Image: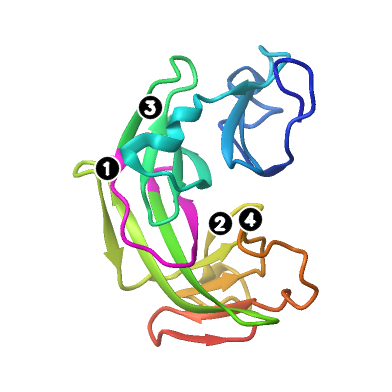
Amino acid sequence: MVNNEGTIAEFVIKATISADPILDANNCVVVVIYEGSCKLAFIRLNKDTTWTYVDPRLEYIGQSLDMIEDVVHVKEKFYAVKVGGQLFSFDIITQSKQLVAEGMRHDLEKVYLVVLNDKELWMVRRFLAFGDEDRVTKKVRIYELDFDKHEWVEKETLGDVALFLGDNFSISVLALNFLGYRLNCIYFNHDHDRYYGYFIGCLHHDFSVYDVKSQRFSQP
């Protein structure tokens, strides 16, 4: 990624868009989380020639110094979340920021945002444990954002939905529409973490299916 001064910035770990870049390029904004400092940058597809870096003071919103974990576009806004679930929204045009929901106490975890039906925003917290040569997902908690009350509401079931989570993109599907998919389950990839990264050869097998009802893990 190239910054406004033309020099090379750090690599991108997550990208999301606001509209289809082919069908609606004039309204397509690409927002990325770039590594190292885990901050945000954006570019408007048919309007900008360089990336714009979002105000780094986002790092201090709500007096939290945790890095940004995920970003999505829903209800005409971009939402970014930090470890623990602290959520804020930001406007591309004005670059104004708003704290949407407070975070929670956390240990070692990864946080994912999932958009359902272009109007619901869910968060999954994946709690991790590390050994000398492995990483294991120990616990999972799921929340839905109450847009009116500005708070996370914990969910006990996903209903007929299955979630697929990873660094690249997290999605929801109606499990009954796909042969072999298990409803009320979360499929985890072994993705990047900022504690050990990709650099220890044995850290590559933390993938599983989590059954929300039984609260048990199994292999896919």
Q: In the image, which residues are magenta?
A: 100-120
Which residue corresponds to mark 3? Answer: 97
- Give the number of marks: 4
Q: Residue at x 53, y 70 (%)?
A: 175
Say which label, 2 or 1, has the lower sequence index: 1
- Local packing at callout 4 (Cα closer than 10 Å; few below 14, some 14-19, many 20+) is some
Say which label, 4 or 3, has the lower sequence index: 3
- Distance, label 3 to label 1, CA atoms, is 16 Å
Going by the numbered disc 4, the residue's amino acid type is Asp
Badge 1 element: loop
- Distance, label 2 to label 1, CA atoms, is 20 Å
Q: Residue 162, percent across and down?
A: 51, 69
- Distance, label 4 to label 1, CA atoms, is 25 Å
Badge 4 element: loop
Q: Residue 7, percent across and down?
A: 79, 22
Badge number at residue 171 = 2
Say which label, 3 or 1, has the lower sequence index: 3
Q: Residue 160, percent across and down?
A: 43, 70
Q: Residue 72, percent across and down?
A: 51, 42
Q: Residue at x 56, y 56 (%)?
A: 171
- Distance, label 3 to label 2, CA atoms, is 25 Å
- Distance, label 4 to label 3, CA atoms, is 24 Å
Which residue corresponds to mark 4? Answer: 167
Badge number at residue 147 = 1
Q: Residue at x 58, y 20 (%)?
A: 27
Answer yes or no: do the residues labelled 3 and 2 have beta carbons within 8 Å?
no
Badge 2 element: strand
Say which label, 3 or 2, has the lower sequence index: 3
> In this rendering, is residue 24 above or below 165?
above
Going by the numbered disc 2, the residue's amino acid type is Ile
- Residue 94 is drawn in which quadrant? top left
